[in-house]
Image (cartoon, grey):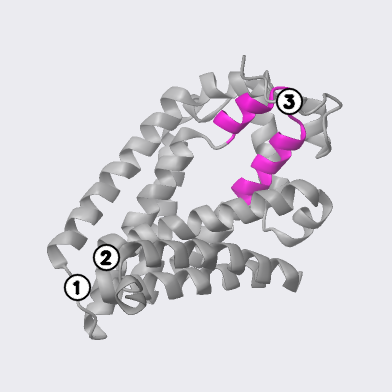
Amino acid sequence: MQGSWALTPPYFLVFAFLCGLVGFRVGWRTGNRVALPLVQGALGWAAFLLAFDILGPAWASAAVGAWVLGTTGGSVYVFFGHPAETDERVFRAATYRASMIEWLETGSGPEKRPAATAVAHLREVIWYTAAAMATANLGSLAMGAVLLNEMNAYVATLLRAAKRTGTVLLFAWNIWSVVRVATYVLIGAAAAAPLLRLSGSRVNVAGARVMALVGAIGVVFDLLLKLLLSQRCGRVLAGAIDLDAARANRSSEVPLTLHLD
């Protein structure tokens, strides 16, 4: 009974979620900004490979999604309570936070420069896909961990500075960022398929192609959402936080409440 359950999708999803939690905790305790994403990516890759070999690329991508949830939950909790250490241990945490706070303050977002935004998105997707193809998703997962950490550090800043915590919980992770993560998960799994097939793993080629197509559509959808919604979402978030507190990376003086009314 235990042996058969261990080969079912729920096992791999739970395992991947725990890999996300444990990978972050171990990487965080190294106190090294290079080691943090490498450890996270390595444990995520272990979950990905196991799921890929036994269940195929679709469930392997679902396992990576569970890893994302695990590392996000663990990191936001730690980042919230350790702002100074976060700036020291997370790549671009302070730089990314400053650029996002400027967006909230000025309302000047990517919709003001669509061509530059599109080029930046395309460049990142190309690098991510190339890393996935060259390393069977290991390098892309480490790259993904870097991007997740900087975003989660920013989310923790918003939660500390929140005046309306419920609104921040709903909007801190931009909808286009959620789409981008899902897109990268699919692209990474599909791009890893050729190298894994050469190494002897069973590969559903048709399934990998479908995932690559959906991922490509997701890239376009992500960009459109960002261009269409960033100004509106920015205004909502700006009104829900203490901008001075966010800029200083400290807590708001407003008592913590959800304000869901």
Q: Amino acid at mark 3?
A: Thr
Q: Which region shows up in magenta?
A: 150-172
Q: Tell me, yes or no, if residue 113 can be seen here.
A: yes
Residue farthest along the bottom direction in this orientation? 200
Residue 31: name its quadrant.
bottom right
Query: Which of the two residues, 119 or 104, is positioned nearer the viewer here?
Result: 104
Query: Which of the two residues, 139 or 250, is positioned nearer the viewer here?
Result: 250
- Residue at the spot of label 3: 257
State the quadrant of the C terminus: top right
State the quadrant of the N terminus: bottom left
Q: Tell me, yes or no, if residue 137 can be seen here.
A: no
Magenta span has 162? yes
Q: Measured from the top left, where is residue 156 in percent x and y? A: 69, 42
Residue farthest along the top direction in this orientation? 261
- Residue at the spot of label 1: 203
Disc 3 versus disc 2: distance between alpha carbons? 42 Å
Residue at image x 19%, y 73%? 203
Q: Amino acid at mark 2?
A: Pro
Secondary structure character of the magenta stretch overall:
helix
The disc label shown at residue 57, or none: 2
Using a 10 Å C-alpha cutoff, classify the residue at mark 2 as few (fewer than 14 neighbours), some (14 to 19) or many (20 or more). Answer: many
Q: Nearer the viewer, mark 1 or mark 3?
A: 3
Q: Measured from the top left, where is residue 70 in percent x and y? A: 54, 57
Marked residue nearer the N-terminal end (1 or 3): 1
Residue 260: name its quadrant.
top right
Assign a secondary structure to mark 2: helix
Residue at image x 71%, y 66%? 28
Query: Which of the two residues, 94 or 2, is positioned nearer the viewer here?
Result: 2
